[in-house]
Amino acid sequence: MRVERITRYPVKGLSPEVMEEVALTAGQGLPEDRRFAFAHADAPFDPAAPTWLQKRHFACLMAHARVARIRSAWDSAAGLLALRADGMAPLDAALGTEAGRAAAAAWITDFMGEEARGPLRLAEAPGHAFTDIAAKAVSIIGLNSVKALEEKVGMALDPLRFRANVLVSGGLPFAEFGWIGKEILLGGTRLRVFKRTQRCAATEVNPATAERDARPQRWLREHFGHMDMGIYAEVLEGGRVALGDALEPVQAELLG
């Protein structure tokens, strides 16, 4: 199998950043993946004592399809978050300043309108990631798994609906489910697969139109008997992963 796309999402729920390569570190996910989130006013997130919270506490596609209308870009070197959406004044917010963080939060609150549960705030804490599971991991999907679902329902499904970190080609549909509890080699790294990725209502949202125009959860259950697409893997040995790199399950004999 071969790496076809590497993606991270600097702000939970917002636009992807497509990468040609990434350096992974043992015990961590992709650097700066889900580093920020816009938390609803009633979200019990404490940056001084960060803990994992369910996605409903944040602006996210599962609850707010309109979020897909936002075009965002994160410049980590400059510390600038660009936010764009039709009908909204463009904003380039310096997230290293209180004024910039407040401006970004006010922009999102205005954009969310009645869907905002009070003024949203920009959430961040050193070392914390606003991922869908508490464990720090890399999410991987086989493109042939997506293709198998497309063929069952007769509809093209942009893999971006599933917001994985790594998309790979080759292999049988859902072959990745057979790696649970096993190790894989991904480029110059070694990972342990520990969990299938159960899909949520975020996958209903078309990333290009912000419309709920598909039912991947229901279709997966109807045609395959589960609601899973992709896997989570823990990084055991860090290193570089680049487009075109191989993904290979580690043979049992190599594990000793």
Image (cartoon, rainbow, N blue to C red):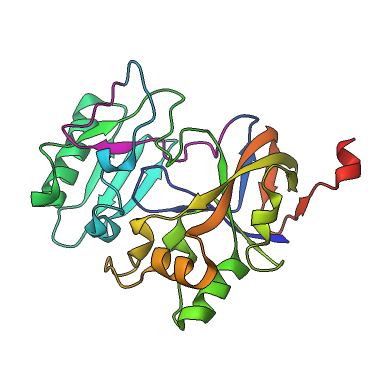
Q: Quadrant of residue 104?
A: top left
Q: How many marks?
A: 0
Q: Is residue 251 left or right of residue 247?
A: right
Question: Is residue 36 within the magenta segment?
Answer: yes
Q: Is residue 201 left or right of residue 231?
A: left
Q: Is residue 111 left or right of residue 50?
A: left
* Screen quadrant of the N terminus: bottom right
Q: Is residue 143 left or right of residue 88?
A: right
Q: Position of residue 248 (x, y in %)?
A: 77, 53
Residue 86 against residue 235 in the figure, above or below: below
Report the predominant secondary structure element of the magenta stretch: loop
Taking depth in this image into account, of 7 and 57 the one nearest to the observer is 57
At x 74% / y 46%, what residue is drawn? 184
At x 15% / y 50%, what residue is drawn? 112
Asked if one can make out residue 106 in the rendered structure from this viewpoint, the answer is yes
Asked if one can make out residue 243 in the rendered structure from this viewpoint, the answer is no
Which residues fall within the magenta stretch?
28-46
Residue 68 against residue 97 in the figure, above or below: below
At x 51% / y 51%, what residue is drawn? 197
Question: Is residue 2 within the magenta segment?
Answer: no
Q: Quadrant of residue 37?
A: top left
Residue ranking furthest to the bottom: 154
* Screen quadrant of the C terminus: top right
Q: Position of residue 12 (x, y in %)?
A: 36, 44
Q: Position of residue 168 (x, y in %)?
A: 64, 60
Taking depth in this image into account, of 163 and 221 the one nearest to the observer is 221
At x 64% / y 68%, what residue is drawn? 173
Q: Position of residue 33 (x, y in %)?
A: 47, 40
Residue 229 against residue 191 in the figure, above or below: below
